């Protein structure tokens, strides 16, 4: 098969790595890709937000299957355009992608299907929103309704902070994403992510993970896109997983189908777990980045069989062939990230690292220059390893990190601490 992956980060490198190992894959193209992806696939220059352009490219290149990585093309209807043109695609319609693109929509769905989540109220008026904040008190969570590239959520520890966030969002700081604001009850607990393939009617959980959102060791400093992840997440025990599937994921999928907008793709449920019960924090309609890297490391070649079955509505016959293993990824970022950072610093030593089913460096933001790699983004490398235990996966990942010569970058040294510290 000729397979096209849309995206160009560490998530897409991990997807490409898994797809490439599957014997069904004859030709693999990634658009736009990056310097790491270019070592295992063809990279193509293509506007991935333009449905007509993606369809045209797929037709010209006899593409049999398209896998959409990020949320933006999904929200823009690229999967709809491909389906309408008869091209097989993994990823939800724009209507179903509203589960990520609109927080208010997701809250409506939770109400309709009884999925446990934080109490909330919706506002299109600043004064009413601020009155609500004063009445509720802090801590409280303020969210812009629309897609805001991770900047639309403020977990306010004080009323003053919450009022300022409301003023900011209605003041236009996030553009159209902030014309409606959702104010939520603060949920305490431990966060974890659950990844579930959905073919519109059947569901198949394909892994759990925990991210590290803060930039500094010990979960300190500003939020980032994610500084590292591991899978599985021990807090999602079999019992909690079963409860989350029965009370949150399955009712959501049924409600989406009932509304005539079935969800097809990977549903990423962000969960807050407390006292052995999960509540929904939010949905994403794509793989997490860097969570995808650890999930792909564990699934390997079978990932494409599952993804294809999902796109073709055949999930009911599928199961995951699990190994009793753990995967962990350490994000190496450019100095200064998540603030301003320089691009172009040279990265040495990648060629000498092991590359096998237990060791892989996925590239997030790299470019090639004169035969070597340079940093071309904020999050740059995802140093990923597998092991029989989480501690082994962690030791292997950091052993690789220590062999990478990149003075322009840094990483957290404690990825996995929550899981490893668990009794
Ligand atoms: P997002 O940027 O949409 O991924 O959400 C940001 C983060 O804010 C989540 O991962 C949680 O850590 C936190 N968060 C969102 N909603 C709540 C809530 N109701 N209670 C506590 N924390 C929350
Ligand atoms: N790592 C968080 C996300 O992909 O949204």
Image: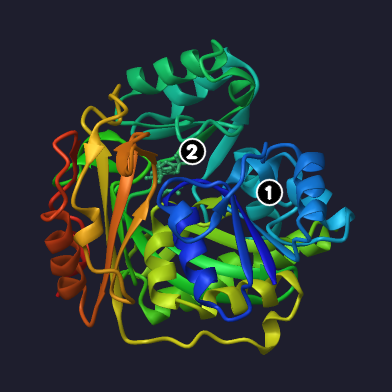
Label disc, if present, on residue 97 of the rendered structure: 1
Q: Is residue 416 visible?
A: no
Q: Secondary structure at mark 1?
A: loop
Identify the image quadrant of residue 197. bottom right
Kindly identify which residue carries mark 2.
Answer: 184
**Mark found first going from the N terminus, 2 or 1:** 1
**Which SS class for mark 2?**
strand
Q: Is residue 127 left or right of residue 49?
A: left
Q: Position of residue 324 (x, y in %)?
A: 32, 86
Q: Quadrant of residue 327?
A: bottom left
Q: Is residue 167 left or right of residue 383?
A: right
Q: Image point 42% across, 51% down: which residue?
A: 10
Could you tell whether 140 is left or right of 331 in the image? Answer: right
Indicate whether 151 appears above or below 45: above
The spot of residue 284 in percent (x, y) is 55, 51
Q: Which mark is residue 315?
A: none
* Marks 2 & 1, CB-CB < 8 Å contact: no
At 61% across and 45% down in the image, what residue appears?
44
Rendered residue at 66%/69% (across/down): 198
Q: Residue furthest front?
A: 370
Distance from the alpha carbon under mark 2 to that under mark 1: 21 Å
Is ligand 1 within 8 Å of the beta carbon of the residue shown at mark 2?
Answer: yes
Of residue 389 and residue 2, the one placed in the foreground of this image is: 2
Choose between 405 and 315: the one closer to the eye.
Answer: 405
The nearer-to-camera label among 2 and 1 is 1
Whole-percent x, y for residue 420 in the image = 16, 68
x and y percent of residue 223 in the render?
A: 31, 36
User: Residue 22 appears in which quarter of the rendering?
Assistant: bottom right
Image quadrant in which the N terminus is located: bottom right
């Amino acid at each position: 098969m000729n397979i096209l992956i849309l995206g160009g980060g560490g998530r897409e490198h991990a997807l490409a790595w898994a797809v490439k190992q599957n014997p069904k894959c004859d030709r693999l193209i990634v658009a736009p890709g990056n310097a790491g992806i270019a070592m295992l696939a063809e990279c193509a220059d293509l506007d991935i937000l333009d449905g007509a352009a993606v369809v045209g490219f797929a037709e010209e290149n006899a593409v049999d299957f398209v896998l959409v990585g990020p949320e933006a093309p999904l929200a823009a209807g690229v999967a709809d355009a491909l389906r309408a043109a008869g091209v097989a695609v993994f990823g939800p319609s724009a209507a179903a992608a509203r589960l990520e693109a609109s927080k208010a929509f997701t809250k409506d769905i939770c109400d309709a299907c009884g999925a446990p989540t934080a109490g909330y109220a919706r506002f299109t008026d600043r004064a009413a929103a601020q009155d609500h904040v004063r009445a509720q008190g802090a801590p409280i969570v303020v969210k812009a309704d629309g897609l805001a590239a991770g900047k639309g959520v403020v977990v306010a520890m004080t009323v003053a902070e919450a009022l300022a966030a409301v003023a900011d969002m209605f003041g236009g700081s996030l553009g159209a994403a902030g014309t409606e604001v959702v104010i939520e009850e603060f949920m305490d607990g431990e966060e974890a992510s659950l990844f579930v393939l959905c073919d519109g009617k059947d569901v198949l959980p394909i892994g759990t993970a925990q991210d590290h959102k803060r930039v500094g060791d010990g979960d300190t400093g500003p939020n980032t896109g994610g500084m590292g992840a591991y899978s599985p997440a021990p807090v999602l025990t079999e019992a909690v997983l079963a409860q989350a599937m029965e009370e949150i994921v399955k009712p959501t999928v049924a409600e989406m189908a009932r509304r005539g907008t079935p969800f097809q793709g990977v549903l990423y449920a962000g969960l807050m777990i407390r006292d052995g019960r999960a509540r929904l924090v939010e949905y994403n309609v794509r793989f997490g980045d860097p969570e995808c890297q650890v999930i792909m490391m564990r699934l390997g070649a079978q990932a494409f069989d599952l993804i294809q079955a999902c796109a073709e509505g055949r999930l009911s016959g599928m199961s995951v062939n699990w190994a009793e293993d753990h995967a962990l990824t350490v994000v190496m970022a450019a100095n200064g990230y998540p603030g301003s950072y320089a691009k172009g610093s040279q990265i040495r030593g990648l060629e000498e690292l092991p590359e096998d089913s237990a060791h892989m460096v996925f590239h997030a933001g790299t470019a090639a220059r004169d035969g070597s790699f340079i940093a071309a983004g904020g999050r740059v490398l995802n140093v990923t390893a597998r092991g029989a235990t989480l501690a082994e996966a962690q030791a292997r990942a950091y052993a690789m990190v220590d062999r990478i010569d990149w003075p322009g970058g840094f990483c957290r040294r404690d990825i996995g601490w929550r899981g490893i510290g668990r009794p």
